[in-house]
Amino acid sequence: MAWAVPEDPYCGLADPGQIVTEWPDLDLFDAEEPAPATLVEQATAAEAAAMAVPGVVNSDGAESSWSSTVVALAASNGFRGTYRASGRSLWTSVIAGNGAGMETDYDFTSAVYGGDLELPETIGRRAGDRAVKRLGARKVASAKVPVVYDPRVANGLLRHLAGAINGAAIARGTSFLKDRMDREVFAKGVRIVDDPHIRRGLRSKPFDGEGVATRRQTIVDDGRLVTWLLDLRSARQLGLQTTGHASRGTSSPPGPSASNFYLEPGTMTPEDLIGDIDGGFYVTQMLGSGVNTVTGDYSRGATGFWIEKGKIAFPVNEVTVAGNLTDMFAHLTPANDLERRYGVDSPTVRVDGMTVAGH
């Protein structure tokens, strides 16, 4: 079959050595397609386990899914390639309490292979336990305190970083990090990595959306920002070479995007991280999207738990966590509990000097 492709105005800066001709097998496709009855059974089991937790009064739903994708790319820079990927996920959410004291929470698991999913009973129990622990939530007085982010919300800070170092934003001058290349952005010792070659990784890919070779790259090294995330277009605009971060769908042109993006773990346990906090806030859920990546201003609604004398004390809701990402990154300390669950992953992190606005 002959391929006919249009002239690509953005392929001119690509080093021929960057166009991939061979790529690794990343084990991204599970050939075992689950029967619909199996998916129903898993969702039902997760929901039942959550409902069995004392204090849980109702279900907010459960879902089990399977997907299969074929990626085929032909580009005017001479690249031709294809690979297959699959995905499995399981999610449930429940409601605890009665009347005005009701709270909800959730848990989920996702993987390339069905056999790598956590058990439905584990997901259900965890969702139920989380909802029950939120009962009796209080408001707190406004204060400037250390804020500790649970891993399932800490990865949001990495997403803000990825947006701020996206080549398109840098080329437009619309990022608070646009002048921070080769400068310290995080504290010494912090390392952030993008690795598209993790086997069975949720966001792994053997080549990018423009046929450029992908590779593991250190994004932040010992606190210093060392690269942008670039595709061919943003690289051309900046007079640089692509970093192999092009991503695209079927109805839009390529744009830079991270793959398996993660903050390397530190040396302290989460318990050590909060052990010296007399008063602080442990965040488990974020609300709203009040982040300005042009200025770095950060203000989001949050729920979680108050920390007193180094221990989790009581649940908290209806507060706002505010700061500026420049200061937050500079005062961020990671714990040692990194798990790869989301594709963008972080251990528990502590950020000192944030404002928690309550009553």
Image: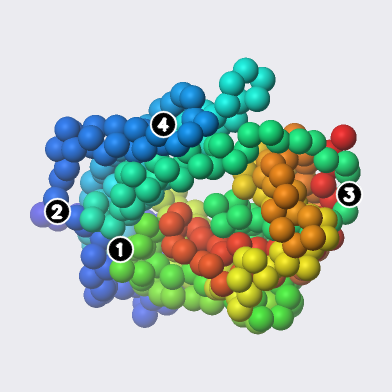
Q: Which structural element holds mark 1?
A: loop
First in sequence: mark 2 or mark 1?
2
Circle nearer the viewer, 3 or 2: 3
List the residue tagged with mark 1. 200
The answer to whether marks 1 and 3 mark residues whose Cβ atoms lie closer than 8 Å is no
Q: Which structural element holds mark 2?
A: loop
Query: Residue flagged by tag 3: what amino acid is it?
Result: Ala
Q: Residue furthest left?
A: 1
List the residue tagged with mark 4. 51
First in sequence: mark 1 or mark 4?
4
Residue 47 drawn above or below residue 173: above
Residue 22 falls left or right of residue 281: left
The answer to whether marks 4 and 3 mark residues whose Cβ atoms lie closer than 8 Å is no
List the residue tagged with mark 2. 31
- Cα–Cα gap, marks 4 and 2: 33 Å
The quadrant of the picture occupied by the N terminus is bottom left
Q: Indicate the position of residue 42 as horizontal and vertical percent values.
A: 26, 39
Query: Residue flagged by tag 2: what amino acid is it?
Result: Ala
Residue 258 drawn above or below residue 129: below
Query: Residue flagged by tag 4: what amino acid is it?
Result: Met
List the residue tagged with mark 3. 143
Residue 271 drawn above or below residue 98: below
Residue 326's image quarter? Answer: bottom right
The answer to whether marks 2 and 1 mark residues whose Cβ atoms lie closer than 8 Å is no
* Residue located at (28% from left, 57% from top): 116
Q: Nearer the viewer, residue 340 or 248?
A: 340
First in sequence: mark 4 or mark 2?
2
Q: Which mark is residue 290?
A: none
Q: Which structural element holds mark 3?
A: strand
First in sequence: mark 4 or mark 3?
4
